[in-house]
């Protein structure tokens, strides 16, 4: 993602069987203990950039899947899920790198404020999905039916950010709800995390 440019001056001119080498700077000295000094100028050009990834790379969209049993449904016992690209459970690797100032990560979803719904239009609120992060420097945003709470990763120094974390999700399971599959991309279950800089 970083662009580097290195500029040096050196020209070679050849003609008529003779060659002359032209330097950006040249020095010579005749003495008992001769010294000669020349200079080179170096330049590195780095563009402003923002890299952000949550979960699998590329076009893959990870599914965080939770399946309480009949014995524990609505009991208030957290239900660990499956899915994501990280460790066991519903977990995803989050990574953000930038040199463009304070990054803000904002969650949104496609539920139009309804939460995760099933075919009968029953709903589970996004507040039932509890996010955590293994790094306070890259917090996992709290989700809500309206979208969620933006977070700001800790700057690494100056205007740069280089943070990695594992984001984990559990289903809080505090309510008894009607049977069915809630969410997925077709029924309000898609969350989009957007990273932005000033």
Image: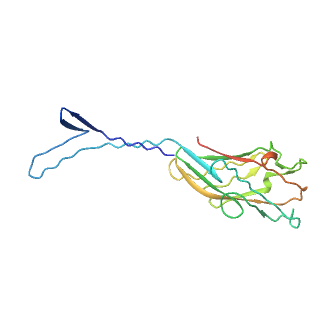
Against 134, is 25 above or below? above
Looking at the image, residue 113 sits to the left or right of residue 12; the answer is right
Residue 102 image offset from top left, x and y in percent: 57, 46
Return the x and y of residue 119 as percentages of the image width and height. 88, 48
Instruction: Kindly indicate the quadrant of the structure image that contains residue 8.
Output: top left
Seen from the viewer's position, the closer of residues 136 and 4 is 4
- The residue sitting at 22% across, 34% down in the picture is 14
Where residue 94 appears, as percent x and y from the top left, is 63, 54
Residue drawn at point x = 51 percent, y = 41 percent: 48
Compared across the picture, whether 1 is left or right of 122 comes to: left
Taking 127 as reference, is 97 left or right?
A: left
Which residue is rendered at x = 64% and y = 59% of the image? 166
Q: Is residue 83 above or below residue 3?
A: below
Pick out the residue farthest to the bottom.
71
| Colour style of the rendered protein structure | rainbow
Q: Residue furthest front?
A: 17
Residue ID at (50%, 52%): 157
Left or right of 8 in this view: 61: right
Return the residue found at the far top: 16
């Amino acid at each position: 993602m970083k662009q580097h440019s290195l500029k040096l001056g050196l020209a070679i001119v050849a003609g008529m069987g003779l060659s002359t080498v032209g330097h950006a700077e040249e020095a010579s000295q005749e003495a008992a203990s001769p010294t000669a000094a020349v200079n080179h100028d170096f330049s590195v050009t780095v563009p402003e950039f923002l890299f952000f990834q949550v979960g699998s790379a590329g076009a893959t969209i990870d599914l965080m899947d939770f399946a309480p049993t009949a014995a524990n449904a609505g009991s208030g016992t957290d239900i660990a899920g499956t899915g994501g690209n990280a460790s066991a459970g519903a977990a995803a690797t989050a990574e953000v790198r930038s040199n463009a100032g304070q990054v803000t990560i904002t969650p949104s979803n496609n539920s139009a404020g309804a939460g995760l719904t099933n075919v009968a239009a029953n709903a589970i609120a996004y507040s039932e999905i509890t996010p955590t992060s293994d790094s306070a420097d890259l917090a996992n945003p709290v989700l809500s039916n309206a979208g969620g709470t933006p977070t700001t990763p800790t700057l690494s120094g100056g205007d740069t950010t280089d943070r990695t974390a594992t984001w984990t999700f559990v289903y809080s399971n505090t309510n008894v709800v009607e049977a069915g599959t809630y969410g997925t991309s077709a029924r309000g279950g898609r969350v989009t995390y957007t990273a932005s800089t000033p």
